[in-house]
Image (cartoon, rainbow, N blue to C red):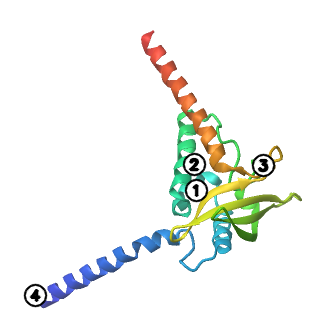
């Protein structure tokens, strides 16, 4: 009887320990703790990224993204799937290209700075067999761990960087148009 009680207490204690660690385990997906620097977080993110099949693997690291950014990205990717393969996001926003595979990438963080209260880490992306260096800025928030809140890409048509969140807003409009056309087409087919 005493062994049973002791076993129950140990089981209960083990469960409590596991549940109390779970929140930090989720963030360990992003290879960071509360002392990780912004540059180290971005470097770790791109180390992981260079082992993926492409940016569509991002749900595996969903805790690495700020909730608003993740929701906007999810909406475009899921909407694109609903539009039956119509390429709405036709490039890799994490690699700033559509010509290379993630496994060909190596990333170097060059500096970080605070702009308008948000930390921005500059990243130089190098691809095997390509002499060009692709530049990005990864905007981060700390809540309490680092999370990506935006990706800024150089844009030759405007003097500042193009924000991925702005691109996603435009793409979400395209998704909504596609889905409404699909719905209209579906109701027209039912009438026949």
The residue at which mark 2 appears reads as: 73
On screen, residue 122 versus residue 191, left or right, reads right
Q: Earlier in the sequence, mark 3 or mark 2?
A: 2
At horizontal 56% and vertical 74% (from top left) the residue drawn is: 32
Q: Which mark is residue 1?
A: 4
Report how many numbered discs are placed on residues in the image: 4
Q: Earlier in the sequence, mark 4 or mark 2?
A: 4
Image location (x, y in percent) of residue 145: 53, 71
Report crowding for label 2: few under 14, some 14 to 19, many 20 or more residues within 10 A (C-alpha).
many
Secondary structure at badge 3 equals: loop
Secondary structure at badge 1 equals: helix
At horizontal 66% and vertical 68% (from top left) the residue drawn is: 42
Q: Which mark is residue 58?
A: 1
Residue 44 versus residue 150 in the image, above or below? below
Q: Earlier in the sequence, mark 1 or mark 3?
A: 1
Mark 1–mark 3 Cα distance, whole angstroms, equals 19 Å
On screen, residue 68 versus residue 118, left or right, reads left
Q: Residue furthest front?
A: 116
């Amino acid at each position: 009887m005493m062994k049973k009680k002791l076993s129950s207490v140990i089981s209960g204690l083990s469960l409590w320990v596991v549940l109390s660690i779970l929140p930090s385990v989720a963030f360990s997906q992003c290879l960071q703790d509360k002392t990780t620097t912004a540059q180290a977080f971005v470097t770790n993110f791109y180390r992981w990224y260079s082992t993926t099949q492409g940016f569509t693997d991002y749900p595996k690291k969903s805790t690495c993204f700020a909730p608003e950014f993740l929701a906007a990205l999810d909406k475009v990717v899921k909407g694109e799937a609903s539009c039956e393969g119509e390429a709405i996001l036709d490039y890799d926003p994490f690699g700033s290209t559509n010509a290379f595979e993630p496994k060909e990438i190596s990333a170097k963080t060059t500096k970080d700075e605070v702009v308008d209260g948000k930390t921005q880490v500059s990243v130089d992306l190098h691809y095997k067999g390509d002499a060009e260096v692709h530049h990005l800025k990864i905007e981060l928030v700390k809540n309490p761990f680092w999370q990506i809140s935006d990706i800024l890409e150089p844009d030759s048509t405007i003097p500042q960087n193009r924000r991925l969140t702005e691109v996603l807003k435009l793409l979400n409009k395209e998704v909504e148009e596609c889905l409404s056309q699909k719905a209209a087409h579906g109701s027209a087919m039912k009438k026949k």
